[in-house]
Image (tube, rainbow, N blue to C red):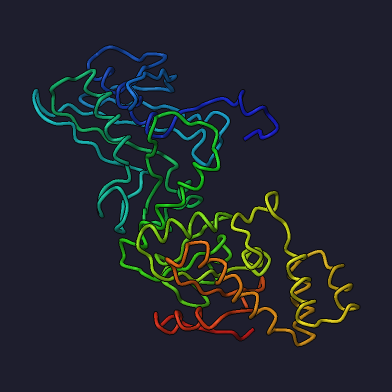
Amino acid sequence: MARDKDRHTWREGYTTGSCAAAAAKVACLILRGDGLPERVEIPLPNSARLEIPVHGGAKDYSVARASILKDGGDDVDITNGLEIRAVARLLSPLGDVHIRGGQGVGTVTKRGLAMSVGESAINPVPRKMIYEAVREIFPQEELEIIIEVPVGEAAALRTLNPRLGIIGGISILGTSGIVRPMSEEAFKTSILPELDQAVAYGHKTIVLTPGHYGYRVATERFKIPAEAVIQMSNFVGFLLEEAAYRGIEQVILLGHVGKLIKVSGGIFHTHNRVADARMEILLAHAALAGVNLDTLKQLAEFPTTEGAAAELLLHGEQRLFHHLAHLASQRAQAFTYGRLTVGTVMTLLSGQPVGWDPEALRMMEEQRWVWSSEA
């Protein structure tokens, strides 16, 4: 997205769900013999209407096909520009509309999502939009509607779908039909399906990690089940509150020292434009631990927390990082008013733990996850 633009001039787009509904309606128009329109209008969940340009379409005996190009407006994501197709087939004069995913639309393989295991990854709102768009052309006939995304399987590898157990393609998504440039609230909400999935799998102890690096460390080094590891991005406080709300009992904060040290300082939104006090927190606690002034001055010259942490380890100061991990856990527990028990594991970029507290070790042992502090 062009972030230098005035947010009030950001261009809206339309969701994959709107594209699928539009393609399905156009396919039905062609099937009825109306020909290929240049644009098509579909109903939205809020009773409004949306007009979308048509990419193509054709009829082949009893089957009609139509396609729409996804346009995310100024909120460009990996689905932007993808071709979303619909295949329509008339089955009988009276009956239901059967909607399923075809090539490039994922299949659900894990519990905890809006769709059941084995179903196509077409969320409930887009499914309803497709149904209503089709019924504007065929009010009572029985039809089969297949939604396809020709390059969806490759595109899905760059989404959360593999983590969520959606295999073989992208999801057909959207709650309003309109894509508005991504707000922070929308991004935070997009993380929640991972948390819901952890709950669905019965996990009362989960791991919150800032991103993909921490996810790899958790699943590969510590052998923690993927469904129990949630990538929280910078939204530590938000995910802690949402975990408590869902009945999670224990949380391990696991990630690079440069991120989690902010939690030690009571910072629960860790984006560097919100709060970048990593070195200040480290130096303050190093001074309180008795590190001499000359060493503190040397540490202040390091451009990264990683470098400063490695230097402190050379000086035999690992207890400082254990203390910082304990502080992070205390701060996180206090943030949720004691509704969660929290442990913390801070690592270097290599994945090697550099600081941890007894709660984290207890949870690891209790869950029979593999603890390794070796380099």
Would residue 256 be visible to someone looking at this image? yes
Q: Position of residue 172 (x, y in %)?
A: 37, 39
Image quadrant in which you'd find residue 351: bottom right
- Count of picture labels: 0
The x, y position of residue 75, in whole percent, is 55, 34
- Out of 112 and 287, give the one closest to the viewer: 287
Classify residue 314 as left or right of residue 146. right
Return the x and y of residue 123 as percentages of the image width and height.
Answer: 32, 41
Kindly give the residue lying farthest to the right in the view shown: 294
Residue name at image x 76 percent, y 87 percent: 316
**Residue occupying the point 27% across, 25% down:** 64
Q: Is residue 2 left or right of residue 177?
A: right
- Residue 59: percent from the left, percent from the top? 28, 22
Q: Quadrant of the N terminus?
A: top right
Q: Residue at x 77, y 77 (%)?
A: 286
Compared to residue 354, the image places residue 263 above or below, namely above
Quarter occupied by the C terminus? bottom right
Is 53 or 154 nearer to us in this picture? 53
Question: Which quarter of the figure has residue 310?
Answer: bottom right
- Residue 354 showing in the rendered view: no
